[in-house]
């Protein structure tokens, strides 16, 4: 089990795998960073996909390094 901080604040989430960590982080993300999610609402589907992929790559690297 790995413990890794949220990429936006000091909140910690745990997961055995990167996917598990995302699952544990999501409820926090929705609640604490709803404004961030909302700011992406106006994005095109393409930009949204690119953003999501970038987020996954960055956070997976953080998870692997932990
Ligand atoms: Zn957070």
Image: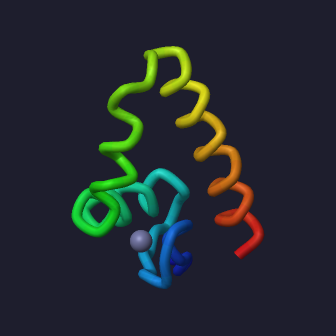
Residue 57: image location, x then y, percent: 68, 45
Q: How many marks?
A: 0
Q: Which residue is drawn at 42% across and 58% down?
A: 20
Q: In which quarter of the image is residue 32?
A: bottom left
Residue 28: image location, x then y, percent: 29, 68
Image quadrant in which the C terminus is located: bottom right
Work out whether 10 lies above or below 27: below
Q: In which quarter of the image is residue 23?
A: bottom left
- In the image, 27 versus 50, the foreground residue is 50
From the viewer's perspective, is 36 left or right of 53? left
Residue 59: image location, x then y, percent: 63, 56
Q: In which quarter of the image is residue 24?
A: bottom left
Work out whether 58 lies above or below 6: above
Q: Which residue is drawn at 33% across and 32% down?
A: 41
From the viewer's perspective, is 11 left or right of 33? right
From the viewer's perspective, is 10 left or right of 59? left
Residue 2: image location, x then y, percent: 55, 77
* The image quadrant in which ligand 1 is located: bottom left
Colour setup of the view: rainbow
Q: Residue at x 40, y 37 (%)?
A: 40
Q: Residue at x 45, y 81 (%)?
A: 12
């Amino acid at each position: 089990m790995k413990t890794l901080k949220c990429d936006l604040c000091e909140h910690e989430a745990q997961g055995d795998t990167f996917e598990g960590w995302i699952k544990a982080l999501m409820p926090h993300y929705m609640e604490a960073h709803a404004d961030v999610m909302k700011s992406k609402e106006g994005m095109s589907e393409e930009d949204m996909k690119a953003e999501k992929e970038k987020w996954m790559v960055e956070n997976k690297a953080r998870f692997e390094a932990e």
